[in-house]
């Protein structure tokens, strides 16, 4: 075993745990829902979302060929996953959950938020529910704060008041809700708007 393999990095355990929870969610889906079910990611089924999050483990080979065209890289990951059977893709997912790449381990704090958002994309898109762990809820909120800066600027226009354990952020008209709902809304998932309170 290499010395780096023994080292536990910040958020690494949380990232592994959330990956395993996503695998468990996907294993519970019917073939129809897995292959063609609705998610909050436009035009992506759960298998496409899985292809994208797995692709993040291969950062250099997945993104560098596409330059600054991040959406093209994301779609290429989804397309790659669509080309393999569910059985093979889930086998790959279990390995991904057990053994994050070195880059993912070092970036676990950021990737946990992205993973949490995409897990919710699947759960919410299919009309399911789950108890979002506290560390994942916090990561989703942080992901929303970061993405909103360049996606929709909501973080600059509102005072965000989490109702489940985080200090308010920003200034302007208040928006209240759980960290998960606020984070999803900041990421552009407007279907959660009904769960938020606007001043």
Image (cartoon, grey):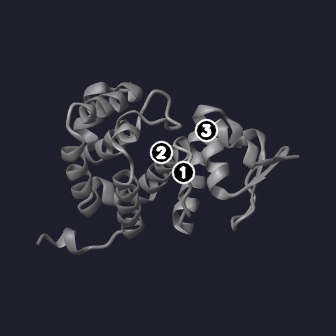
Residue visible at 57% across and 60% down?
Answer: 137
Mark drawn on residue 189: 3
N-terminal of the pair, mark 3 or mark 2, is: 2
Residue toward you, 121 or 176: 121
Kindly state the secondary structure of the residue where label 2 is placed. Answer: helix
Residue visible at 67% across and 35% down?
Answer: 153
Residue toward you, 159 or 88: 88
Where is mark 1, residue-wise? 128
Q: From mark 3 to mark 1, how far is it between C-alphas?
A: 16 Å
N-terminal of the pair, mark 2 or mark 1, is: 2
Q: From mark 3 to mark 2, how far is it between C-alphas?
A: 12 Å
Where is mark 2, residue-wise? 122
Q: From mark 2 to mark 1, how far is it between C-alphas?
A: 8 Å
Residue visible at 32% across and 44% down?
Answer: 56
Residue visible at 41% across and 55% down?
Answer: 25
Q: Are marks 2 and 1 in contact (CB under 8 Å)?
A: yes
Q: Position of residue 63 (x, y in %)?
A: 30, 34
């Amino acid at each position: 075993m290499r010395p780096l393999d023994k080292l536990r990095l910040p958020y690494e355990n949380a990232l592994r745990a959330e990956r395993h929870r996503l695998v468990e969610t996907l294993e519970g889906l019917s073939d129809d829902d897995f292959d063609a079910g609705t998610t909050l990611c436009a035009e992506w089924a759960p298998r496409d979302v899985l292809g994208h999050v797995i692709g993040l483990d291969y950062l250099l080979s997945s993104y560098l060929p596409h330059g600054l065209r991040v959406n093209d890289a994301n779609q290429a990951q989804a397309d790659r996953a669509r080309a393999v059977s569910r059985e093979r893709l889930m086998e790959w997912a279990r390995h991904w959950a057990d053994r994050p790449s070195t880059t993912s381990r070092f970036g676990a704090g950021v990737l946990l938020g992205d993973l949490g958002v995409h897990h919710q994309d699947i759960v919410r898109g299919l009309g399911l529910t789950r108890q979002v762990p506290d560390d994942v809820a916090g990561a989703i909120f942080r992901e929303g704060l970061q993405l909103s800066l360049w996606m929709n600027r909501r973080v600059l226009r509102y005072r965000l008041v989490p109702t489940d354990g985080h200090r308010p952020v920003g200034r302007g008209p208040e928006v209240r809700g759980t960290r998960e709902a606020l984070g999803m809304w900041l990421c552009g998932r407007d279907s959660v708007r009904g769960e938020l309170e606007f001043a």
